[in-house]
Image (spheres, coloured by chain):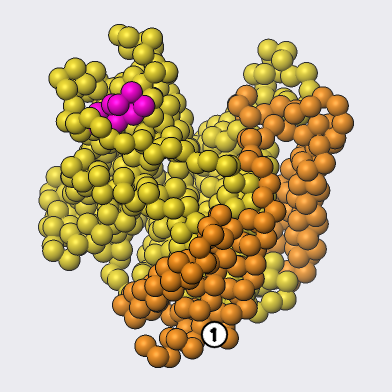
Chain colours: A orange, B yellow
Amino acid sequence: MQDRGTGPKSPDGPAWGDTAVGLAVLILAAVLAWQSTVIPNNAIYAQVGPKVIPWIATAMLAVLGVLLTSWGLRGGWVHEEHGAFHPWGCAWLLLGLVLNVTLIGVAGFIIASTVLFVCTATAFGSRSPLRDTAIGFALALVSYVGFDRVLGYKIGSGLIEGLL
Amino acid sequence: MDTLAQLAAGFAVALTPYNLMWCLVGVTVGTAIGVLPGLGPALTIALLLPLTYKVDPTAAFILFAGIYYGAMYGGSTTSILMNTPGETATIVTALEGNKMARRGRAGAALATAAIGSFVAGTIGTIGITFLAEPVVTFALKFGPAEYFSLMVLAFVTVSAVLGSSAVRGLTSLAIGIFLGLIGIDLQTGQPRFTFGLTELLDGINVIVVAVGLFAVGETLYLACFRRPAGGELLAVKDSIWMTREDWARSWKPWLRGAAIGFPIGAMPAGGAEVPTFLSYFIEKRLARKPEEFGNGAIEGVAGPEAANNASAAGVLVPMLALGLPTSATAAIMLSAFQSYGISPGPLLLQQQSALVWGLIASLYIANVMLLVLNLPLVGLWVKMLRIPEPLLYGGILVLATIGTYGITQSQVDLILLYAMGLMGLVMRLFDFPTAPVIIGMILGPLAEQEFRRAMQISQSDALIFLQKPLSLTLLLLALLAVLGPQLWRLARGRARRPGAASS
């Protein structure tokens, strides 16, 4: 609503990133519309059925999606400045997240978290995997004992957890 | 009962060794996460929500409030010494504070920030003490229609007025409302937005969304779009005891900052951004040496820092008295009430008076503890700023795993967490605010409840929202908040492009 950070970025040509975001909001609205229609209506129990607010949310997203898309096509909006894209940083971090999800059920929290820690550190430019492994393992171990055993979180079992 | 008697009873609760311990833990953790970039109070309280299964509500809320206040103190240290404000609220502190540190006045900047935070935090807490009951008395006259309209006003102000764009803020809000609707509708028992997945019948946990957006999203953003060199950590060379001149130049900005911050924080709009900027410009205008602004004027640290803490205290007024959260942190605290089965709202003060007054009393104690933690012990926190980025963000992601997987042991939640992280990354890249997502998610279902109650009373006549004068006023205010700036701009004839006009 304020002037800060608003207004079209360039007067000529569509901004494809912004347009894509607008379209994504429209797609989300479509998904919501589909899910709103499949909500069973149960008029006996409530004056306002279960569908009313879902349809309002859907309508909001549809209108906003149209606005965002149309701005995107007219040059987009002004963004905060971002640093340069680091494909390797991105790749290492995503690898860490994927490995964490796959390993946590099989090998347990401590091993999965150590792997996640090392991948994240590498993504942020660390070049000493051995040190990172040691620190990550110690952190995972301490967190596991602290949260699972002391604070009563349920982080599950695993290869190392079974030994504790 | 008399307010002071209630407060005394509150101190009796807060001063037990057990609760004092939770308060100390809270302010220590709060300062730490405020100092560390990448962690904030909303995220930290979300990570600690599972504690609500183990700890009694009074202790948990004393802990959460300590974290909330502590983060405000800690954030200023990072802004001053590193010029990398962790939260929008401390952007202004970095303007003058970092310049002061560059001139070798870091100690004085830290001192005026900490003492100003203490003064304003205490004034704000006094404000909560005496404002809570009148607000409750007023709110007890509210029917469901008024409540619904108040929530609509809060929705609009937190998403449309405070951010840089109404449309993007409202988009975030709508996504939050959508996330809040997922699961079984409590009134009719119908599943909504579950895509046929049994995992979604219980809804999405707010922890997953908050941690995903704030922790995973921010880490993804920094890993993918890292700037070559981060802020430089400046050393504290001078004394942390302010000179006579520093005191003379600080005390008025502290008081003015508190006077600006508290009322704005307590309004249904909330937010610390507006009061800190406002305080900065007022101090700049009133300063005896305005030429120092831009080169490290102590008034420019003292005022905004006080405004920031007073507005943080102010946000607790609608949260405790009305059950109306106006910041992401307040929304997550509200969900903690729900997980205890305590319904927030105007009856909270009567039904849970030991809890609420114990919490308010603990805020006074927290302020004293924080003054000690952040002034004589500031060196400790400076050391934390030396933690290398790779290790810091590695640790944050491990904590994020605990906060989500540690509740349900479900890989689905972990995948959802990372999906939220990707959404957070996209929102960050395209300048969508994230706080409205959390507020929409928590407040959306509550608004639906009030909407239904109002419609039940009026026998499905939607005009009830316009027939009640107070409800109508609130809705008109909300409409004005959305359309006012556009109309004003149109009237001034400056809206040449539709994108510029309504963005």
Residue B101 vs B31, above or below: the answer is: above
- Where is A41 relative to A79, above or below? below
Q: What chain does badge 1 belong to?
A: A
Q: Is residue B93 above or below residue B136?
A: above
Q: Name the residue at the bottom extreme.
A: A163
Residue lying at 14% horizontally and 45% vertically, measured from the top left: B4
Residue named by callout 1: A107
Question: Can residue B458 be seen at all in this image of the molecule?
Answer: no
Is A69 magenta? The answer is: no
Is A111 or B123 nearer to us in this picture?
A111
Question: Residue B409's x, y, as percent?
Answer: 52, 79
**What is the span of residues highlighted in magenta in the rendered image?**
B100-109
Taking depth in this image into account, of A101 and B62 the one nearest to the observer is A101
Would residue A91 be seen by someone viewing this image from the given angle?
A: yes
Q: Position of residue B261 (x, y in %)?
A: 36, 31
Residue B32, image x and y in percent?
33, 52
Picture residue at 37% right of the left edge, 47% below the top: B385
Q: Amino acid at mark 1?
A: Ala
Horizontal placement of B61 versus B37: left or right?
Answer: left
Where disc 1 sits, the SS reads loop
Residue B107: say if magenta: yes
In the image, is B323 to the left or to the right of B252?
right
Which image quarter: residue B53? bottom left
Other-residue count near label 1 (Cα within 10 Å), few / some / many at <14 / 14–19 / ≥20 = some
Q: Quadrant of the N terminus of chain A?
A: top right
Between B107 and B186, which is closer to the camera in this rendering? B107
Q: Main secondary structure of the magenta part?
A: helix
- In which quadrant of the rendered view does residue B267 lie? top left
Quarter of the image that includes the C terminus of chain A: bottom left
